[in-house]
Image: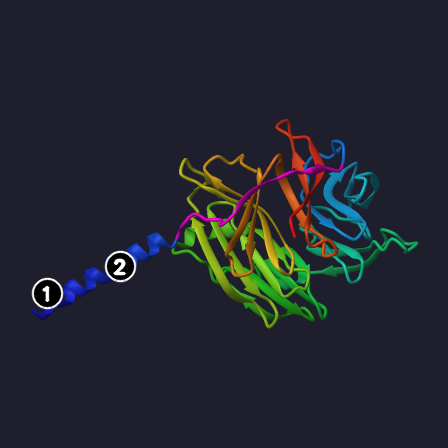
Amino acid sequence: MWKKLLLYVCLITILCSCQKQHSAYAPPTFPEVKNIHAHRLSDELLISYPLDMAVSEDYIFILALVDNTWLQVYDKSTGQLLGSFVRRGQGPGEVTTANMCYYDAREKKISVYDESSMKLLTYQFDKEDDNWGTLIEEQPFYNLGATVRRVWGLRDDKFLVDGQLGTKSDQQKRFQILADTEVSADYNDFPIDTPEERAVWLSPAIAVSPDCKKMVVGTLYGGVLELFDLSKGIELKAIRKFYPPVVQYLSGTIQSTGETVWGFSALCATDEKVYSVFIGDKNPNLFNNLSVFDWDGQELIKYNTDCLILRICASIREPNKLYGIAFSKTREFYLVSFTFDS
């Protein structure tokens, strides 16, 4: 009798657990959907591929290799190219393989991360400064013992690191905060059940809020959105699981399958909101939306756009405006802006 009862309880527990895991993924439901027009700022950009972008009070920065320079600077109002900076190379102030950039509005400087040499290089871009585009700091991260993929500067001379620190025998790691080259906080959990799916988090979309107190992470394969508090370390505050990361692993690389739903292709953040290009479909070419969330991961509004958007960024000086890099079906890139209702 007791054995039968115990078996019954176990079966019910397993069934409930399976139902809970299955229902953990649910497509987003936006309470409001609108159309929004993209204001075109520039003619076709003479770049091969935009790796990243940032916005200051006056400029739009595009990280793209053009004539052996990584950083292309445009006037934010007219879309005019003002100059190209950060030469490709291994000398002082030069970058071998750039993969990200971000702008510090307080210091009026932009930083570019060199993934090959694992160095963060910072340049002055104050409009009133005579040394416009001059290297002012170079921070190395190659002495941390393993791969460092991306780095963001935080307040109080701290750095947020997306990397694989430690030896190969260590647990796979995700994020660390460095203070004086020492790890002061880390976060190494994954919101999945199978270790094989961890590779999906090797290159997610990541954005840090302008006040450096929050971080959002979104997967391209599937749709998993994680929101972190950085004010006292790295604390997971919320997670939304929209689509499971269905992938296959061939020759050591991640590849999609016929069942893969594509997720977040781009993210940017203000202190109040998270903006994204969220595909949410098995068709990987649906870049025609701006999906907005709050910092609890709740859906706010979805804007259907009249262009395909590859990169987005926000300016703290213009809370109701977003800048982006759009592209045509022939892969020609151009600058756009979006103005939202207040």
Judged from this view, the residue extending furthest toward the right is 130
**Residue 258 place in picture, x, y as percent:** 41, 35
Specify the amino acid type for callout 2: Cys
- Give the residue displayed 90% in from the left and 55% down from the top: 128
Q: Does the magenta-highlighted stretch encompass residue 35?
A: yes
* Quarter of the rendering containing residue 260: top left
Specify the amino acid type for callout 1: Lys
| Residue stretch in magenta | 25-41
Comparing labels 2 and 1, the label whose residue is closer to the camera: 2
Q: Residues within 10 Å of mark 2 (few under 14, many from 20)?
A: few
* Quarter of the rendering containing residue 3: bottom left
Q: Label the magenta part by its dominant secondary structure.
A: loop
Task: Name the secondary structure under disc 2.
Answer: helix
Q: Residues within 10 Å of mark 1 (few under 14, many from 20)?
A: few
Q: Nearer the viewer, residue 51 or 144?
A: 51
Q: Which mark is residue 16?
A: 2
Do callouts 2 and 1 mark residues in contact (Cβ within 8 Å)?
no
Q: Nearer the viewer, residue 152 or 113?
A: 152
- Give the residue displayed 81% in from the left and 50% down from the top: 58
> Which residue lies under the disc numbered 1?
4
- Give the residue displayed 32% in from the left and 57% down from the top: 20
